[in-house]
Structures are given as C-alpha cells and as structure tokens.
C-alpha cells in the first residue's frame, strides 16, 4: 500500500511540475506578446509625434510668412 501511495505522490508531483513549467512558458509568451505590442505602440506614438512636429513646423512657417507680409505692407 505504501509503495502505491508513493508512486501516486510521485506522479502527482511530476504532473504539478509539468503544469508549473507550462504556466511559466505561457507567461513568457504573454510577456513577449506584450513587449511586441508595446513596441508597436511606441512606433505609432513616435510616428504621430513626428507628424505633429511637421504640422507645427508648417504652421510656424506660415505664421512667420504672414507676419512678414504684414510688416512689409506696413512699411
């Protein structure tokens, strides 16, 4: 009887170790996916920032041009 119980306990221990390893692998995969998603988000954000900077530059140039025109008209 004792031997059977020992075998069952060993089996249960092995199964729990396997389950733990599987869970660990799944967690690592999830982390990788999250990291990829974060990278993609960062790329999108930087693209948006670059576009906004371009718009701001254009806007600033246009404003400067308008001011220059006004000044030249005043003279």
Image: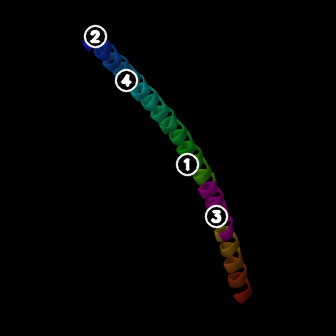
Nearer the observer: mark 3 or 2; the answer is: 2
Question: Dot 3, crowdedness within 10 Å: few (<14), some or many (≥20)?
Answer: few
Circle 3 residue: 57
**Label whose residue precedes the other's in the sequence (4 or 1):** 4
The image quarter in which residue 75 lies? bottom right
Give the Cα distance between marks 3 and 2: 80 Å
Question: Dot 4, crowdedness within 10 Å: few (<14), some or many (≥20)?
Answer: few
In contact (CB < 8 Å): disc 2 and disc 1: no
The image quarter in which residue 61 lies? bottom right
Q: In the rendered structure, find residue 72 and report the number of the disc placed on it.
A: none
The scheme the figure's colours follow is: rainbow
Magenta residues span 48-59
x, y percent for residue 8? 35, 18
The image quarter in which residue 56 lies? bottom right
Circle 1 residue: 42
Left or right of 17 on screen, residue 73: right
Nearer the observer: mark 3 or 4; the answer is: 4
The residue at the point 67 percent across, 79 percent down is 67
Circle 2 residue: 3
Give the Cα distance between marks 4 and 1: 37 Å
- Would you place residue 44 above or below residue 21 in this image? below
Circle 4 residue: 17
**Label whose residue precedes the other's in the sequence (2 or 4):** 2
x, y percent for residue 70? 71, 84
In the picture as drawn, the residue positioned furthest to the top comes out as: 3
């Amino acid at each position: 009887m004792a031997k059977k119980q020992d075998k069952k306990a060993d089996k249960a221990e092995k199964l729990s170790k396997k389950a733990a390893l599987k869970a660990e692998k799944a967690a690592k995969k999830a982390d990788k996916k999250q990291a990829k998603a974060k990278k993609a988000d960062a790329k999108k954000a930087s693209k948006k920032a670059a576009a906004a900077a371009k718009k701001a530059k254009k806007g600033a140039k246009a404003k400067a041009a308008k001011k220059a025109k006004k000044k030249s008209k005043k003279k």
